[in-house]
Amino acid sequence: MPRVGLALGSNLGDRLANLDAARKALGKIAVAGEAILGASTYQTEPLLCPPGSPFFYNSVVEIAFAGGPLELLELTQSIERQLGRSGTPERNAPRTIDVDLLYFGDRIIDTENLVLPHPRLGERRFVLQPLAEIRPDLILPGRTRNIAALLEELQSDEPPLIRVEACDSRVSPQGTNP
């Protein structure tokens, strides 16, 4: 059963509640009985967003998933819609929830709709730092360095992340700490 990593972000509404709702929804599609790993939540400045965009809350989760990558993409997009994300023509516009696939086991995928591992994962502190909490030794397909090393070597203009909420690395399928 492949382990898949997902980045969560929210910069509209009750950001903590939005992330919690996304975690719960992901718990419902995860393989029953398999560990769900969850990182702390961090406040981050918006990158490449329209001027005046609110700060984000970001986190990362890892689940076991029984389906395929495109099925998971459809499910995560459905979760986003259910949680109030609306389609907007403006790129990187503020949003109630963002669920991005980071990796899908050892698969390398390069299609029009999905590229995995996420092509900018290694460039983003707001993804690497929480991912390093739960999977520091993970080496992504096509890479030679683990997540902890990628974070340590990161050259980024991003300001330091601010931890908003600590999370046990394991969460129940309902998305709450055990």
Image (cartoon, helix red, strand yellow):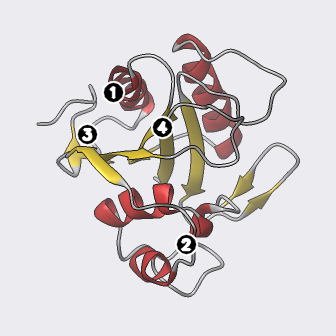
**Residue that appears at 43% across and 31% down:** 26
Residue 52 point in image, percent of width and height: 62, 31
The residue most toward the right is 112
Q: CA distance from mark 2 to mark 1?
A: 28 Å
Image position of 111 with respect to 98: above or below: below
Mark sitting on residue 140: 2
Element under disc 2: loop
Q: Is residue 45 visible?
A: yes
Q: In the image, residue 67 lies at what x, y percent? A: 57, 39
Q: Secondary structure at mark 4?
A: strand
User: SS at mark 1?
Assistant: helix
On screen, 105 above or below 22?
below
Q: Is residue 60 left or right of residue 140?
A: left
Q: Nearer the viewer, mark 3 or mark 1?
A: 1
Q: 98 or 56, which is in the foreground?
A: 56
State the separation of the CA atoms marked 3 and 1. 25 Å
Query: Mark 1 — residue?
Result: 16
- Identify the residue at horizontal 61%, vertical 73% (top origin): 141
Check whether the beta carbons of the residues at disc 1 and disc 4 lie within 8 A of each other. Answer: no
Q: Nearer the viewer, mark 2 or mark 1?
A: 1
Q: Are marks 2 and 4 in contact (CB under 8 Å)?
A: no
Residue at horizontal 64 percent and vertical 63 percent from the top? 107
Inspect the image, locate mark 1, and give the three-letter code of the amino acid beneath it: Leu
> Which residue has dot 3 on it?
33
Residue bearing mark 4: 56
